[in-house]
Image: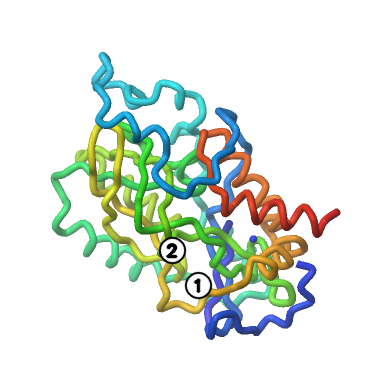
Amino acid sequence: MKSHPTGDGACGHAPHGRWGGREIGASAAAMVRASTQPPGWRTEGSVDLGRPGWLAGGVQKRGLMSDDPYRHHPGLRGKIRPAAESVFRTLDVADFDARAVAAGMPADWRTPDDQREAARAAFLQERRGRDLWVFAYGSLMWDPGVDFTEVRRAFTPVYARSFCLVDQGGRGSAAQPGLQLALDEGAGCEGLAFRIDAAVLDGETFVLWRREMIAPAYRPVMLPLETGPGPIEALGFVADHGTEHIVTGIPMAEKARMIASASGFLGSNFDYLAGTRAQLAGLGVSDPYVDDLYARVMALRG
C-alpha cells in the first residue's frame, strides 16, 4: 500500500478507520502541495455558496495592455509568486523520497516517473499547439510554479474545496492522519485560472505533473469555468475516488479533530489549514467551508 506525503485531532484514532463507507489505509497525500506565506487582499465575509460577486457584472472589457498577464486583475500583481521564485521549478523528488522513507513510508510511496510522464503525454496528445488554461483552487493560486501569460478569477459550478485527502506523512502520521485539500464534487469553487502558452506547454506541464501527480490522489480533467471575460475550459486536478488517499464522508467535527493535532515532516496540519485560509483571504476568495473548519479547529485548540 503506497503512501503520499504533501501539503488537514485530538482524534486518538487508529490509522485505519471508516467514514462514509471508505476505509483508510496507510495512505497520505500531496507531499509537494504545502505552500507558504499568506499575502493580503480582502477578508472573506460572505457565506453565499453561489457565484462570486465579480461575475455579477457580466463580461468585462479587456485591459489596455493585452500582453500583461494581470490585465484583467491588476490587484493580483504582487500576490502571486513568480515562477522563477517557486521551489516547485526545481523540486528534488529524491529529497522527498528520503524524507518519506525516514517518516516510515514505503519506498514505493509515489508514482514511478515513467508512469507519470506517460500519463502526461497521453493528456497532451490532442492539446499540443494550443494554449492551456489551468484551474487553481489551493496553493497553485498563490504559488503556481509555472510561467503564465494570463490570469483570471474563475469559478467552477460543479466542484468545491474539500479536506478529503488523507495524509500520513507530510502533515500527518500513521497514528494521527492529517487532511489536505482536494477538489471534489460540490456546490461551486472560486479560484484562479492561469493560461500557459502553447510554446512552453511541455516544460510547464512537466512541472505541474511532478507536483500534482507525484502520487495517487488526483486525476486531471478539463473543467468548464466562468470568468469575467467569458467562459473557458481549464485543466483541473480533482479528487480521484479510485485511490485510497481520497476519503469522503468524514464529518466536520472529525476533520477538525484530525487537523487540530496531526503533524508530519512538512509541519503541523493546523499550520497548513491556517496558511490556506490566510492565502485565500489574501487573494480575496471567500470559502465558508474553510472558515467553518478553521473555527472548529480553533475551538478545539482553545
The image quadrant of residue 101 is bottom right
Identify the amino acid type marked 2: Asp
* Residue neighbourhood size for the residue with mark 1, other residues' Cα within 10 Å, grouped as few (<14), some (14–19), many (≥20): many
Residue at 70 percent of width and 50 percent of height: 271
Horizontal and vertical percent position of residue 40 = 59, 29
Circles 2 and 1, Cβ within 8 Å, touching? The answer is yes
Residue at disc 1, secondary structure: loop
Please say if 42 is above or below 301: above
Please say if 268 is above or below 54: below
Please say if 276 is above or below 222: above
The image quadrant of residue 192 is top left
Residue at 49 percent of width and 56 percent of height: 161
Mark nearest the camera among 2 and 1 is: 2
Residue lying at the far right of the rendered structure? 302
Horizontal and vertical percent position of residue 167 = 61, 68
Residue at 60 percent of width and 73 percent of height: 250
- Foreground residue among 128 and 132: 132
Horizontal and vertical percent position of residue 225 = 29, 47
Spatial CA span between label 2 and label 1: 10 Å
Assign the C terminus to one quadrant of the image: bottom right
Residue at disc 2, secondary structure: strand
Residue at 57 percent of width and 29 percent of height: 42
Horizontal and vertical percent position of residue 109 = 53, 73
Location of mark 1 (residue): 246
- Foreground residue among 54 and 167: 54
Location of mark 2 (residue): 184
Please say if 87 is above or below 64: below
Identify the amino acid type marked 1: Ile
